[in-house]
């Protein structure tokens, strides 16, 4: 059946709206539920403070919800879209906008729940620190929302850019791939930057005198956890702004989609892994504030190594974006670049989390016994290198697919 | 709702080169700068032991941030306090400006947060080179092993992107949300509440986060 273009664009804007708020609601709901559960437990431990804990829980949930609200706004804009004869490629831009906003809100919503929950627990532990805990919770969850903001920026670009000069093929894959790159890439970073915010908030209740040191460490740890999401956003910008009009439709559509998926998927693991490391660092500093120097250094080293898989993903994306291929409509021609992107993308998830866990336990140990700093850092690097090997296998297979076959 | 993407611009032609200026951002930045200068003059014009109202506000702000800077920076680098204070005042007032009808936040334009992010980036690296010496500064990029250099450089560059996009996205997102919801409810009841949340609450938090991150970046480089 042949429908006019406008019908397809309208349908895509509805589907994009559904993706945006459908995926976007997942994270915020989980985060808020986690905060509420911890608030109940905190009240049970310290019933006299139940009023303060309830207030704190509601404020924390309001911030954790903002990722969900962003998703709702993008949905509204897509639902009330009025067509004025846009080209058909706009339909894919709307799908991409919905995916980018919806997927990127998952992580930030979940991440925002951690500081809210730990602030409630901290108030029950040490009611005098309430003001400090609420402030730190607000800063921590505001930082967590950044990956969702990246998704929102790309969604706005996809919704309001002028697509009249972009060819339908392979332009559709660039716009959809851009949505996937930033949307998937933000999941891990959103969760990851929430973990240090939570541990730091709880740690301040334990050790209020070291609040500044803990907050500094939390901000550094959260900021580094967001680097994978930035790679996703860079790939999304490249896909959206580069000119694909003189490229043949096949196999370029598969290469552009593969480029988006490669960085997007491979950013999930490092984001979570970096967050785990930063969380243990914040907790360790709260236990023994004097160790903040070696703990922060080891945390940064561990995080930098854990990030390498997203850099492999980024590398594969760049190769897919910039190598030249002959026009070919055979199935092999499009299956190869798509498989290479997926291979590196999925292959990057595990090593990222695994290396993050290795660094997290090392950091925890160094916080208790800083004499062991040099030895443990060396063991951590060896362990991370071994855990990295699966990511390197994925990279090798991707490169084989692209250059040998 | 078509005005979401419209950016008012002045295009200047100087000696064959074309300069594009975002007029709204510029005018709003000037307004913010004017408010800060007027406030500073009012607060310091008659300094007395019994402070007047402007002096009291200034003293509260300065002492709060002095504490943060003293905790974060070593003895030799505390002269960055006026910079940190100015960044907070500028970003905070910029974020507040959108609450007033007919005015808009200069931070809504990516150029403003990016300029401040780059400023913090260069100053933190300058402070690092000055405190540790160039050799110690440069050798940090090769820690823990020499091949980590590209990763460390990428990590440093991504700081600029994350700090500026965080502020820009929050403020722009908030103003678009207020515009869209205001349009849907015919500007009844909801917009003031949304302005209170996104303008006053989110605006203050984001200004504080931006300032704290700039401070932390300087403190990491100088330690």
Image (cartoon, coloured by chain):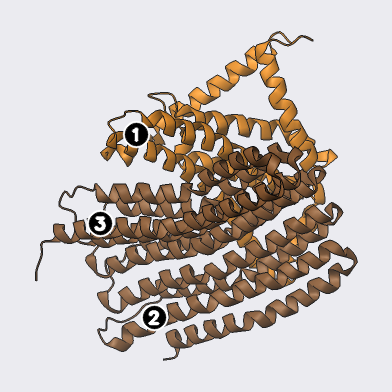
Chain colours: A brown, B orange
* Residue bearing the label numbered 3: A14
Q: How many marks?
A: 3
Q: Residue B66: which quarter of the image?
A: top right
Mark 3 lies on a secondary structure that is helix
**In the image, which is nearer the foreground, mark 2 or mark 3?**
3
Parent chain of label 1: B
Identify the disc placed on residue A51.
none
* Residue bearing the label numbered 2: A337
Q: Residue at x 70, y 16 (%)?
A: B56
Q: Residue B37: which quarter of the image?
A: top right
Q: Residue at x 41, y 48 (%)?
A: A70
Parent chain of label 3: A
Given residues A257 and A356, the one toward you in this image is A356
Mark 2 lies on a secondary structure that is helix
Crowd tier of the residue under label 3, counting other residues whose Cα lies within 10 Å: few below 14, some 14–19, many 20 or above: many
Crowd tier of the residue under label 1, counting other residues whose Cα lies within 10 Å: few below 14, some 14–19, many 20 or above: few
Name the quadrant of the N terminus of chain A.
bottom left
């Amino acid at each position: 059946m042949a429908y006019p273009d406008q019908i397809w664009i309208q349908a895509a804007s509805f589907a994009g709206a559904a993706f945006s708020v459908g995926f976007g609601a997942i994270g915020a709901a989980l985060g808020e539920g986690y905060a509420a559960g911890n608030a109940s437990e905190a009240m049970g431990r310290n019933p006299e403070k139940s009023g303060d804990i309830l207030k704190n829980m509601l404020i924390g949930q309001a911030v954790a919800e903002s990722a969900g609200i962003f998703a709702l706004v993008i949905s509204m804009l897509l639902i009330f879209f009025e067509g004025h004869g846009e080209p058909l490629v706009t339909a894919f831009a709307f799908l991409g906008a919905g995916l980018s906003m919806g997927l990127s809100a998952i992580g930030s919503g979940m991440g925002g729940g951690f500081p809210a929950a730990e602030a409630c627990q901290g108030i029950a532990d040490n009611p005098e620190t309430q003001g400090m805990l609420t402030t730190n919770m607000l800063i921590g969850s505001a930082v967590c929302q950044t990956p969702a903001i990246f998704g929102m920026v790309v969604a706005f670009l996809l919704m309001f850019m002028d697509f009249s000069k972009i060819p339908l093929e392979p332009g559709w894959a660039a716009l959809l791939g851009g949505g996937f790159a930033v949307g998937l890439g933000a999941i891990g970073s959103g969760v990851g930057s929430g973990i240090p915010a939570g541990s730091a908030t709880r740690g301040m209740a334990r050790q209020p005198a070291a609040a500044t040191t803990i907050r500094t460490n939390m901000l550094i740890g959260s900021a580094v956890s967001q680097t994978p999401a930035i790679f996703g956003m860079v790939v999304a910008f490249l896909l959206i702004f580069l000119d694909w009009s003189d490229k043949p439709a096949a196999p370029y559509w598969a290469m552009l989609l593969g480029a988006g998926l490669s960085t997007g998927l491979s950013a999930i693991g490092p984001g979570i892994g970096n967050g785990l490391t930063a969380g243990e660092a914040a907790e360790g500093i709260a236990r023994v504030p004097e160790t903040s120097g070696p703990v922060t250094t080891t945390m940064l080293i561990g995080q930098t190594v854990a990030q390498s898989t997203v850099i492999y993903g980024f590398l594969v994306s760049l190769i897919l974006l910039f190598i030249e291929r002959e026009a070919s409509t055979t199935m092999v021609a499009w299956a190869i670049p798509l498989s290479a992107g997926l291979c590196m993308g999925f292959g990057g998830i595990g090593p990222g989390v695994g290396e993050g866990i290795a660094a997290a336990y090392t950091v925890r140990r160094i916080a208790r016994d800083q004499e062991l700093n040099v030895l443990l850092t060396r063991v951590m690097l060896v362990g991370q290198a071994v855990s990295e090997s699966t990511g390197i296998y994925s990279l090798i297979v991707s490169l084989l697919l692209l250059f040998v076959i | 709702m078509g005005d979401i993407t419209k950016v008012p611009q002045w295009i200047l032609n100087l000696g064959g080169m074309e300069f594009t200026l975002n007029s709204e951002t510029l005018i709003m930045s000037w307004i913010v700068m004017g408010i800060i200068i007027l406030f500073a003059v009012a607060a310091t014009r008659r300094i007395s032991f019994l402070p007047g109202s402007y002096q009291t506000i200034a003293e509260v702000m300065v002492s709060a941030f002095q504490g943060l800077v003293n905790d974060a920076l070593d003895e030799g680098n505390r002269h960055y306090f006026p910079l940190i204070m100015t960044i907070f005042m500028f970003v905070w007032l910029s974020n507040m400006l959108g609450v007033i009808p007919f005015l808009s936040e200069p931070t809504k334009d990516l150029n403003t947060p990016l300029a401040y992010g780059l400023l913090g980036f260069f100053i933190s690296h300058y402070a690092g080179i000055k405190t540790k010496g160039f050799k110690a500064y440069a050798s940090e990029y090769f820690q823990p092993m020499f091949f980590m250099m590209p990763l460390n450089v990428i990590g440093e560059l991504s700081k600029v992107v994350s700090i500026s996009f965080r502020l820009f996205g929050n403020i722009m997102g908030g103003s678009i949300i207020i515009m869209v919801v205001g349009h849907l409810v015919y500007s009844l009841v909801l917009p003031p509440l949304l302005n209170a949340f996104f303008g006053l609450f989110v605006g203050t938090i984001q200004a504080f986060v931006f300032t704290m991150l700039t401070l932390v970046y300087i403190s990491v480089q100088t330690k």
